[in-house]
Amino acid sequence: MTSSRALTAAILVAGGLTASPALALTCENGVIVEYEYSGHCNWIGDSDDGVPSETPPTSTPPEPEVGNVAFQTPPPGSHYLVGSTVAPTARAGIGQKALGNLNLTITIDTSRSMDEPVPNTGKTRYELAVEAVSALLDDLPETASVGVVEFNSFAEYVSLSKKLTPEHKADLQTSLPAIQPDDQTNYERAIQLSYYNVQTSPYWWGQPEASANQQVLFISDGQPSVGGNWRYGFAPSGLRNNSVSVNTVGIGPLYYGARATLLEVANIFDGKFIDIGSDITGLLPFFQGLNGNLVGVDYVMVTDPNGTYRIDNVGLFGEFTLRDTILGENGNMFEVTAYFDDGTFATDQMWLTGVGPTSAVPLPATGVMLIASFAGFGLMRRWKQS
């Protein structure tokens, strides 16, 4: 752990070499994190009395909207040959949770208990959790900004937040399986590093691409066993003041205390608690959008050129794909209406144009002469053979 923490600090220091000088504050457990805010790099962390060295001003996020749904692909008005098959994609959510560019931090428990084998699977809790995270990464668009934090007695970056390019996704899907769970469970450090990581995203407040969709996915199988009080301090206040939702996922046979704590985390940070329970194999289908979502979508009604149908299971962050549809000539109308958990709904429409096969294009005069010459050669060969 020591070398990794040193590397994390070195990376962050390197990123702030051109910023103004910063004061260092030694944390109780030896973890110091640097972050950049409004062009000034500051060292922050918990002092012995739990008071942060500096508290920068918090930004004011835009007022959330009620509910939204919008087609993502293909672009509205696209033209296709008649008979082409398309399966449009769309995204829905309350308060732009799914429409804004997603800024997601995945915070995953790597304490010793995560190394427990899961009966009838041949895998550990951590291995099944990594499979589910990998499936989630496969479902997210490249525009999503994703960072990963792993925590046990301390917390460390697996990767800072950045857009989910194929290279970034491959790095995450390679790095996560290589981690060996060990040590105890520290929610305080997990919450702190999650907040610091969220701020490294290109979608954080104040950036040109700032988004209302700021989320943390917090995965654990147990309650805190070391560390201080995760409810108070700079990081928890920053998460709340900047509208970052912390969604908790409880896996394995949760004891009452662990379940109550994960539910409390979700409630404090305006997130959602998902209790996968003892059958941890349910984690993968949940992350693939088969058992629920985190953006308040109840179900979606779809109308396409072939009729109307219902989609009950959207993806974790509101994404869904319409059924394959064969396009007819001219206008092909698609409509989606998303119904939300609070009883509201939102609708979006898209038209795709079907065009007939292209007409035969007349050959230029030189082409006609060339074909005629080929025909002449054939006549000459037949004449010589006769």
Image (tube, rainbow, N blue to C red):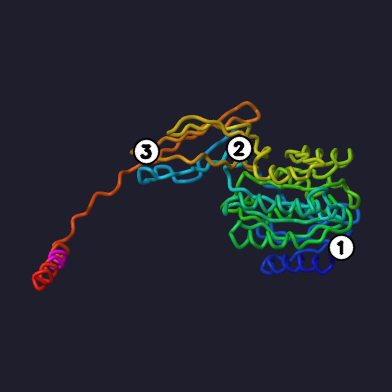
Classify residue 386 as left or right of residue 299.
left
Q: How far, Cα to Cα, is label 1 from label 3?
A: 65 Å
Q: Which residue corresponds to mark 1? A: 30
Classify residue 151 as left or right of residue 49.
left
| Image depth: mark 1 or mark 3 in front | 3
Q: Position of residue 173 (x, y in %)?
A: 68, 59
Please rate how many residues cluster around mark 1, counting C-alpha atoms within 10 Å: few if below 14, some from 14 to 19, many from 20: some
Q: Position of residue 287 (x, y in %)?
A: 68, 45
Q: How far, Cα to Cα, is label 2 from label 3?
A: 31 Å
| Three-letter code, disc 3 | Gly
| Three-letter code, disc 1 | Gly
Q: Which residues are magenta?
A: 370-375
Q: Which residue corresponds to mark 3? A: 328
Q: Quadrant of residue 275?
A: top right
Vertical position of residue 37 compared to residue 366: above or below: above
Q: Secondary structure at mark 1?
A: loop
Among the two numbered marks 1 and 3 on one chain, the one whose residue lies closer to the N terminus:
1
